[in-house]
Image (tube, rainbow, N blue to C red):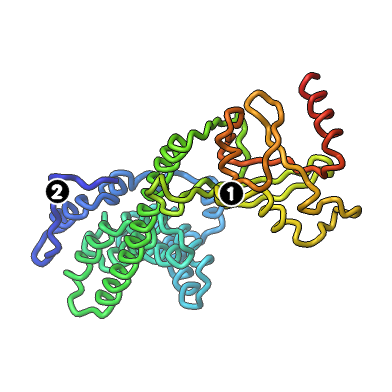
């Protein structure tokens, strides 16, 4: 929630009344909302009503106190789930006794801090601070939860309020160090994320400019393939005249096999690609037909036809051919054994006409 532009909090709590402290808390964005909605947490709960039937007989405050004591026993023995349940049962009595309700909300917040239920921590602390705006543990736990939620400005305000009422407490210094360390880490992470995003935007613009300068025609299909992180890039990300690298797919239609190369220089020749891919016999090439010097390379044209690609000329020459089109930023070459080229072309034409 954005900060109120007209609100400034004062961390000095000495000699302030409860109403004044409550006003200070209302200047922290989270509590501006939470303290207005404190009654929402008190809505009836069918399960709690059933549990109440098992409670000890007596006045509401007596029953609530019994549940609270059971909760404390569980908390001391680190049975935090059970402790939280007992505190919840105690609060369900709605006894109206601050000396019972405040510890229950505060201790349940401690349990939820252990469970990493940070939103519930803030809700419980808001209940405490409504009743006691200077409650140090509620301020401390609120700050811890806000730090975990990366709401650092609000956390800092809670820390200041906490430190004002707990001067000299070593927990203040420890919390401040934790807040600063995590805020610095988060800000560095966000700065790096922004840098990467800005670089990618620049890269995309430069790639578009580079395509135009090279007269490469492009189009996007209805269902572009998932290439992961592979994309058209430049050797110098902000220079359209630098070397271009493109994701490249080598298709072997007669065997229903393929090879995906995520980054290939525009200056690489098809022959160099074949020599790299088929430096050893492919496991699916039982007849050893796919040898670099006995293969032909084709590319689909913009009209759905085929054009033969020179194996010893740079890939860029195929991309700028008048009939060529780069679809989805992916270079696609069809590779077939020379001995089977005629049959492949015939099959392609038949599929096109059907």
Identity of the residue drawn at 49% across and 64% down: 115
The location of residue 159, given as percent across then percent down, is 24, 66
The residue to which callout 2 is attached is 7
- The quadrant of the image that shows the C terminus is top right
Q: In this view, does 321 lie above or below 131?
A: above
Badge 1 is on which residue? Answer: 228
Can the viewer see residue 42? no
Q: Above or below — where is 83 with respect to 118?
A: below
| Sequence-wise first label, 2 or 1 | 2
Numbered-mark total: 2
Q: Can residue 290 be seen in this view?
A: yes
Q: Are marks 2 and 1 in contact (CB under 8 Å)?
A: no
Please provide percent x and percent y for residue 317: 58, 40
Residue 101 at x, y percent in the picture: 35, 60
Report the front residue among 233 and 272: 272
Callout 1: helix, strand or loop? Answer: loop
Camera-side residue: 49 or 175?
Answer: 175
Query: Could you tell whether 118 is left or right of 133 in the image?
Result: right
Residue at x-position 28% and y-position 44%? 36
The residue drawn where x is 32% and y is 60% is 187
What x and y, as percent, mark residue 1?
29, 46
User: Foreground residue, 172 or 96?
Assistant: 172
Q: Is mark 2 on a helix, strand or loop?
A: loop
On screen, residue 253 versus residue 153, left or right, reads: right
The local crowd at label 1, few if under 14, some if 14 to 19, many if 20 or more residues have their Cα within 10 Å, is few
Mark 2 against mark 1, which lies toward the viewer? 1
Whether residue 307 sits left or right of residue 126 in the image: it is: right
Q: What is the C-alpha distance between the residues marked 2 and 1?
A: 47 Å
For residue 57, the mark is none
Residue sticking out furthest to the right: 287
């Amino acid at each position: 929630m954005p900060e109120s532009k007209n609100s400034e909090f004062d961390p000095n709590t000495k000699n302030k009344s409860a109403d004044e402290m409550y006003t200070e808390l209302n200047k922290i964005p989270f509590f501006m909302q939470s303290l207005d909605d404190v009654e929402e947490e008190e809505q009836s709960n069918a399960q709690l009503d059933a549990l109440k039937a098992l409670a000890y007989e007596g006045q509401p405050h007596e029953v609530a106190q019994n549940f609270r004591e059971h909760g404390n026993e569980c908390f001391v023995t680190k049975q935090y789930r059970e402790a939280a349940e007992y505190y919840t049962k105690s609060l369900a009595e709605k006894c109206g006794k601050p000396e019972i309700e405040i510890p229950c909300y505060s201790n349940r917040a401690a349990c939820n801090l252990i469970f990493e239920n940070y939103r519930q921590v803030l809700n419980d602390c808001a209940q405490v601070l409504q009743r006691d705006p200077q409650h140090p543990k509620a301020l401390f736990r609120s700050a811890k939860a806000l730090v975990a939620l990366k709401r650092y400005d609000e956390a800092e305000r809670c820390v200041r309020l906490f430190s004002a009422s707990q001067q000299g407490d070593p927990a203040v210094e420890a919390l401040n160090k934790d807040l600063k360390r995590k805020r610095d880490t988060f800000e560095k992470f966000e700065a790096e994320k922004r840098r990467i995003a800005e670089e990618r935007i620049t890269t995309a613009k430069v790639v578009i400019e580079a395509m135009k300068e090279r007269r490469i025609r492009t189009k996007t299909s209805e269902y572009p393939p998932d290439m992961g992180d592979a994309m058209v890039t430049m050797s110098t990300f902000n220079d359209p005249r630098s070397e271009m690298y493109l994701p490249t797919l080598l298709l072997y239609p007669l065997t229903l096999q393929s090879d995906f190369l995520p980054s290939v220089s525009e200056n690489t020749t098809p022959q160099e690609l074949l020599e790299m891919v088929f430096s050893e016999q492919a496991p699916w090439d039982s007849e050893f037909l796919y040898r670099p010097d006995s293969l032909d390379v084709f590319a689909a044209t913009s009209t759905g036809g085929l054009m033969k690609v020179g194996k010893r000329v740079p890939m860029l020459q195929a991309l700028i051919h008048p009939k060529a089109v780069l679809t989805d930023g992916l270079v696609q070459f069809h590779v077939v054994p020379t001995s089977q080229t005629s049959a492949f072309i015939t099959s392609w034409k038949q599929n096109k006409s059907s």
